[in-house]
Amino acid sequence: FSRSLFGCFFGYMAFPPMCTASSIPQPSYENLPCFVFLDAGSSGCYTVNESFESPGVRETGDVRMKKTIWIVRTAVCLALLLVLQVATKSLGQFVTGSCVNLVLAMAALTGGVWSGVIVAVISPFCAYALGIGPAFLLFVPCVALGNAVYAVLFALLVGRFLTAQHLTAWGCMALAAAAKGLALYLVLVKLVAPTVVPAAKLAAVTAAFTWPQLVTALIGGALACLLAPVVKKALEKRN
């Protein structure tokens, strides 16, 4: 037994196992200096780049960047909508409403469904807090609902056909405007307003939420259909 043990020991010392480059685990750290590995099984050598960033890490960084860009665009649309409401308040409903629908449509076309929905839902509450929204608090969720319907249809339908099928996109734009007007009429005018507005003032208060909503939604949607392709191309070039 001792002879065999000493034989294995001296055999190991005389002929140690060759460590190849493939058996060396590559470090997972980032931004390390360049290394040169000698291949004991051949006469060559190879270098390893100083960056050991794995595809998974790179992909995670890309996802974070996209999320950051999406958040910034959504915030910009929300801020722009509020600024336009304040700036055009004295110009009447048709100017202000058209600007609001333009921003809603652009948020949905450039940022997707959730960007449009977030701007559509949050903006009426912010406008009410700033004193430029509906006169009654119970009207605010109704306006948010109408805006959300408009934004969702723009993102799912208009955005789908805008670049390839222009006539279909314009038809979907008209559908989104009609759906918003119908939602506001049924929920706000017929359901909520009679419970909070005196009967003598009901017609005057709810007049702004009837056919003018359809007109401003059509104007804002038409402007968005014209501007969105140009804006999207500019954003893609910057990315």
Image (tube, rainbow, N blue to C red):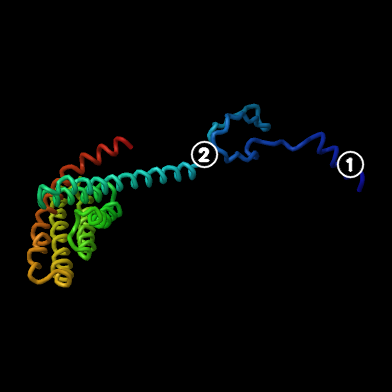
Q: In this view, does 198 lie to the left or right of 57?
A: left
Dot 2 and dot 1 residues touching (CB under 8 Å): no
Q: Is mark 1 on a helix, strand or loop?
A: helix
Task: Locate the C terminus and report the quarter of the image it occupies.
Answer: top left
Q: In which image quadrant can residue 25 be found?
A: top right
Query: Which mark is in front, 2 or 1?
Result: 2
Give residue 140's position: percent from left, percent from top. Answer: 22, 61
Q: Residues within 10 Å of mark 1 (few under 14, many from 20)?
A: few
Furthest-right residue in view? 2
**Of the residues shown, which amino acid type is indicated by label 1?**
Phe
State the residue position of label 2. Answer: 53
Instruction: Give the left or right position of residue 29, taking residue 42 as reference.
Output: left
Image spot of residue 233 (x, y percent): 25, 38
Is residue 70 found left or right of 58 in the rendered image? Answer: left
The mark nearer the N terminus, 2 or 1, is 1
Residue ID at (28%, 55%) = 122
Left or right of residue 174, residue 39 in this image: right
Q: How many labels does the image show?
A: 2
Q: What element carries label 2?
A: loop
x and y percentages locating residue 13 in the rendered image: 82, 36
Could you tell me which residue is drawn at 30 percent across and 45 percent down? 73
* Image x and y of residue 116, in percent: 26, 53
Frontmost residue, 202 versus 118: 202
Label 2 sits on what residue type?
A: Glu
Disc number for residue 6: 1
- At x 91% / y 48%, what residue is drawn? 1
Q: Is residue 187 above or below residue 54?
A: below
Residue 39, label in figure: none
Q: Nearer the viewer, residue 142 or 112?
A: 142
Q: Say few, some or many: other residues with alpha carbon within 10 Å of mark 2 (under 14 / 14 to 19 / 20 or more).
A: some
